[in-house]
Image (cartoon, rainbow, N blue to C red):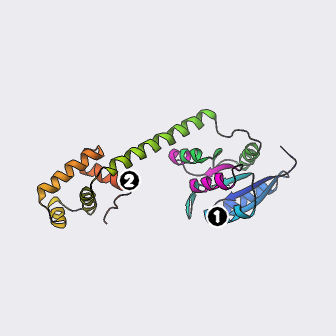
Amino acid sequence: MSDDPVRVLLVEDQTVFREALAVALEREPDVAVVGLVGTITEARICLSRTSADVAVTELDLPDGHGVDLIRDLRKLRPLVQVLILTATADRYDLAQAVAAGAAGVLQKSAPLAEIVTAVRRLCAGQPVVDPAELVRLLRLAEQHRTEAEAAQAALARLTPREREVLAALAQGLSDKEIAQQLHVGRETVHTHMVNLLGKLGVESRLQALVFAVKHGIVRLGV
């Protein structure tokens, strides 16, 4: 490591925690906090004006997900090492962050001394995440990516009319009401329902509705 201080950007929406961490870092003679922000927008502005060696960021931010910021960092400042500091226990969120380029993950409950050590290790190119855990997170991210691609392919096979049936189902309409809304017979509605269940690979209307809501093609009650 050079004699220059480790330049740290802190991205954290909880003001008290952010300022406490900044104070702890600034007490270290080899660390300098170059940015202290609470949103992705502010982080992007900060990055356009200054450089950092390590970015310490939360995932759940007011104007977006930390994964989006990580991707931006990898494009704008490829050499910046990203440390995720979060209270989330969602392994998929962590997997997404690692797949996007995060080099380390710590819980907010970690002692401040451990966080400072992690910042130094990342700047020195040393691992923070156990290699076996890193592999597990990357595999989880790949699994979810594959599942999402398969889901989008299944949704792409739906006809416009089948999508209308799904949308009507999300409104809580019965077959009779769907038929009236679409100006078709109830048997036609039944046929569309059977076809869309098959295309989505699900067994029930409820499963089809959950599938559609999960992947963003309908909203409940709309």
Quarter occupied by the C terminus: bottom left
Within-10-Å neighbours for mark 2: few <14, some 14–19, many 20+: few
Q: Is residue 213 left or right of residue 187?
A: right
Tell me which corner region of the image, top left, top right, bottom left or bottom right, holds residue 147: top left
Circle 1/circle 2 CB separation < 8 Å: no
The residue carrying mark 2 is 214
The one nearer the camera, 115 or 35, is: 35
Q: Any mark on residue 163, and which?
A: none
Numbered range of the magenta stretch: 67-94
Q: Residue at x 14, y 62 (%)?
A: 184
Q: Position of residue 44 (x, y in %)?
A: 65, 62
Q: Position of residue 94 (x, y in %)?
A: 56, 46
Q: Position of residue 103 (x, y in %)?
A: 65, 44
Number of labels in the image equals 2
Q: Is residue 154 left or right of residue 103?
A: left
Q: Is residue 59 left or right of residue 113?
A: left
Distance between the alpha carbons at the discs numbered 1 and 2: 29 Å
Q: Secondary structure at mark 2?
A: helix
The residue carrying mark 1 is 38
Residue 75 magenta-drawn? Answer: yes
Q: Residue at x 73, y 39 (%)?
A: 126
Tag 1: amino acid: Gly
Q: Secondary structure at mark 1?
A: loop
